[in-house]
Amino acid sequence: MTNSQHTNEFSVILLLDKTSKDKIEDIRTSMPASPYRDDWPHLTLLQGCHTPRSMSDVELYNILCPILNRLLKPKLHATVAGLSNLFGGYYKDTSSIILSTSNDLQREHISLLSSLRGSHFKVDRKESIYRPHVTIRLGVPMNQGSLQLANELFPEGKSIRFDKWEIYRLISSRGKRQFYKVLSSAV
């Protein structure tokens, strides 16, 4: 990438398993088209973290890989907390499936932050109080049919699993901040 500056900032996301993703795609296809649903449904586990020094993508991957793979071994999950239609400045009128994370996932988040600090990584103050959560953006307000389908596929209390993680690095390019995927775990 030309005219871009690699930064030390990174984020980590957990991807929902294929079964859950496919159900979300079923809901999305029952709704009108939207430019705001290009992402694989995910949970942001870490955001606003910084490497202790300039570090290549491969170095960062080699440090985080064993830690993140250990996290996925117990099959972390989130639980459906509800469905909502909402308005946001960026996404405009949209709808989402909101998931609350398990206590195990919250404990792992805190443990991961401690491990990073112990390795001299910098963690933004807001990350210290951040509670991992999942909001699955559907892109447009739910209509009656998509709401009914969403309630059938993701009833309140349903457990959803994660089976993959990805690391994203921040670059600064032409005055804009952009994230790009570094590497991810094997499926």
Image: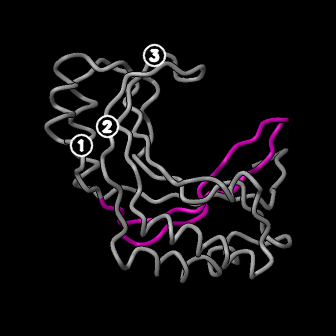
Asked if disc 3 and disc 1 are in contact, CB closer than 8 Å, the reply is no
Q: Quadrant of the C terminus?
A: bottom left
Closer to the camera in the image, 90 or 60? 90
Q: Which residue is mark 2?
A: 82
Q: Report how far apart the C-alphas of labels 3 and 1 lie in the structure.
A: 23 Å
Region rendered in magenta: 161-187
Residue lying at 31% horizontally and 32% vertically, measured from the top left = 83
Residue lying at 70% horizontally and 75% vertically, measured from the top left = 116
Around disc 1, counting alpha carbons within 10 Å, would you say few (fewer than 14), some (14 to 19), or many (20 or more)?
some
Q: Which residue is mark 1?
A: 156
Tell which circle, 3 or 2, labels the residue nearer the N-terminal end.
Answer: 2
Q: Quadrant of residue 138?
A: top left
Q: Report how far apart the C-alphas of labels 3 and 2 lie in the structure.
A: 17 Å
Discs 3/2, front: 2
Magenta stretch, overall SS: strand
Residue lying at 72% horizontally and 51% vertically, measured from the top left = 126
SS class, disc 1: loop
Tell which circle, 1 or 2, labels the residue nearer the N-terminal end.
Answer: 2
Q: Is residue 118 left or right of residue 131?
A: right
x, y percentage for residue 160?
Answer: 28, 56
x, y percentage for residue 158?
Answer: 22, 51
Is residue 74 on the magenta stretch? Answer: no
What amino acid is labelled 2 in the image?
Gly
Asked if disc 1 and disc 2 are in contact, CB closer than 8 Å, the reply is yes
Rendered image: mark on residue 93 = 3
SS class, disc 2: strand
Is residue 166 on the magenta stretch? Answer: yes
From this view, report whether residue 155 is shown above or below residue 35.
Answer: below
